Image (tube, rainbow, N blue to C red):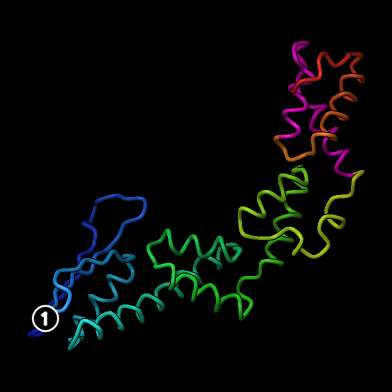
Amino acid sequence: MSTCALSWSVELPARGVRSARPRASLCVSSESHGEERFSLPVSVGRRLEALAAEGFEPASRAELLHRLGEVSRQCAHARMEALVGRRDYSCVELGRRLCEDGFSRSVADEIVSRAREVGIVDDARYGAAFARSKALSGWGRLRIERELSRRGVEPSSVPGWPQEFLSAEDERERARSLASRRRLTGKNDYQKLVRFLCSRGFAVSLSTSVAREVLSDHGLEPMGTEV
């Protein structure tokens, strides 16, 4: 695929070669920039090949890259729809996934921004559903908040957090229920219970208090204070 001042070709992954994230390549040769190679999502590479088969012959490198941008946005939008069709995503999570699939950060940001504008993704909605699910699964407040932050959702932006999701009494009962199911060995039980509860996202003060209660229920005294 070439003109007098420009030549380009698309390389797709070989059939049968397994890769976690296969990539296509766009190879471009121009007088202004010499030899260049661009890594692309396979869907973009296939779309460019189809355009070439239809007779697309860009007159310049700029025209080729402009069409590449258009194709990338179209494929990224299709990928976004496929992803959110299976489950909800936060904006950060969706952008990260598109980049992992091979789309540029600028294209990913543009697609996520548009999805947010029309309500396809909504961090408050996502955060509320995530927090409710994890609270019901027995996660403590701190663990939920850490995971929300990792996914790009500020906990304070979730309507009703944490009062409508985790009352102090409910959280204590969940911590007691989890700790009560732990097997006691008679060796460092207090430290083990505290570490376990903290790992589930319960505050240290709550974890130590519940650990003492559980041991007391079994007629045991906590040995040592270091966790």
Residue at 24%, 78% (x, y): give it: 50
Label the magenta part by its dominant secondary structure.
helix
| Badge 1: residue crowd in 10 Å (few <14, some 14–19, many ≥20) | some
Q: Amino acid at mark 1?
A: Ser
Q: Residue 91, how many percent across, how many down?
A: 58, 66
Residue at 40%, 78% (x, y): give it: 74
Q: Quadrant of the N terminus?
A: bottom left
Residue at 77%, 43% (x, y): give it: 140
* In this picture, residue 9 sits left or right of residue 74: left
Q: Residue 227, how many percent across, how many down?
A: 74, 23
Quarter of the image for residue 177 reads top right
Quarter of the image for residue 102 reads bottom left
Q: Residue 80, how many percent across, how many down?
A: 49, 70
* In this picture, residue 47 sits left or right of residue 207: left
Q: Is residue 135 above or below residue 200?
A: below
Residue with the mark numbered 1: 2
Q: Is residue 57 above or below residue 206?
A: below
Q: Is residue 40 magenta?
A: no
The magenta span reads: 170-198
Quarter of the image for residue 51 reads bottom left
Residue 160 visible in image: yes
Residue at 61%, 53% (x, y): give it: 150
Farthest residue to the front: give it: 32
Residue 1 visible in image: no
Farthest residue to the top: give it: 186
Looking at the image, which is closer to me, 104 or 11? 104
Looking at the image, which is closer to me, 61 or 26? 61
Farthest residue to the bottom: give it: 59
Q: Residue 154, how many percent across, how many down?
A: 70, 60
Mark 1 residue element: loop
| Count of numbered circles in the view | 1
